[in-house]
Amino acid sequence: MAMSKVLLALCKCILLVGLTKAIYSKMNEQTVNVIDYSMKNLTSMPIFQQNSTTDINLRGNLLQVVPALSFQQSKKLKSLDLSMNKLNLIERGAFEGLTELIYLSLRDNKLTSNSFHVGIFQDLISLQDLNIHLNFFSYEYTLILQSEISHLESLVRLGIDLRGQLQINKCFCKLSQLLDLELVGLRNYSDNLFQNSKLEVS
């Protein structure tokens, strides 16, 4: 009986490891813990236990909501991929505490003008790479969205849709570290809008 319980526990452990594909490697002499939930047909956000996870991949699922405090146990998170889901709502506090996050992809979702709240990015003080292409923001909301993004002072790379926009919001000039700006839908812009002369616009 005892042996059966041991075997059952062992099988559960193997299944869990196989599902999350937790990968430990050395990068800059630090342990990197990657949790890969990509392409699992998930419809709700998994519960992440307190750990040293640095990378979470949730790409290609069926997630519609990012609940508040979804990653509160993952304070060491560096990379978060939420692309290619069906996200239509990111609750207040969803990214709370992610002060070490460097990469965030919200690409190819169903985000609209009602999906975000003011201050959504306020804790992401280390964010360097943000991809928010292929969503459904209204013309009016892109102005608000640009204002929110302008507070990401560490941002180096940005991908954003500005379809229907006549110009880039002047608040983007605050992004003094920005080197790579990928625009979709905007044909006219002024190079002198940005203080950083090394910026490449595509």
Image (cartoon, rainbow, N blue to C red):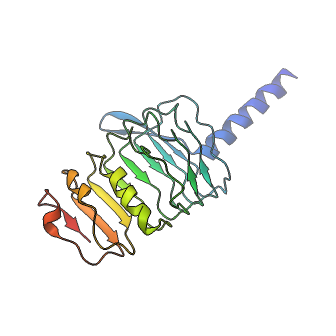
For the N terminus, give its image quadrant.
top right
What is the x, y in percent for residue 43? 68, 53
Q: In the displayed structure, would residue 178 be above or below residue 77?
A: below
Quadrant assignment, res 170: bottom left
Q: At 33% from the left edge and 45% from the top edge, which residue is drawn?
A: 127
Please tell me how many numbered marks the rendered image carries: 0
What is the x, y in percent for residue 110? 56, 63
Q: Foreground residue, 98 or 168?
A: 168
Q: In the displayed structure, would residue 34 be above or below residue 180?
A: above
Q: Foreground residue, 36 or 25?
A: 36
What is the x, y in percent for residue 15? 69, 42
Q: Foreground residue, 13 or 99?
A: 99
Work out which residue is located at the far right of the displayed protein and give it. 1
Work out which residue is located at the far top of the displayed protein and give it. 2
Q: At 77% from the left edge and 26% from the top edge, which residue is drawn?
A: 6
Quadrant assignment, res 3: top right
Q: At 39% from the left edge and 41% from the top edge, which residue is drawn?
A: 78
Q: In the displayed structure, would residue 69 be above or below residue 162?
A: above
Q: In the displayed structure, would residue 17 be above or below residue 7?
A: below
Work out which residue is located at the far front of the displayed protein and give it. 140
Q: Is residue 144 left or right of residue 61?
A: left
Q: Is residue 142 left or right of residue 85?
A: left
For the C terminus, give its image quadrant.
bottom left
Q: At 47% from the left edge and 65% from the top edge, which residue is drawn?
A: 137
Q: Foreground residue, 79 or 29?
A: 79
What is the x, y in percent for residue 69? 55, 36
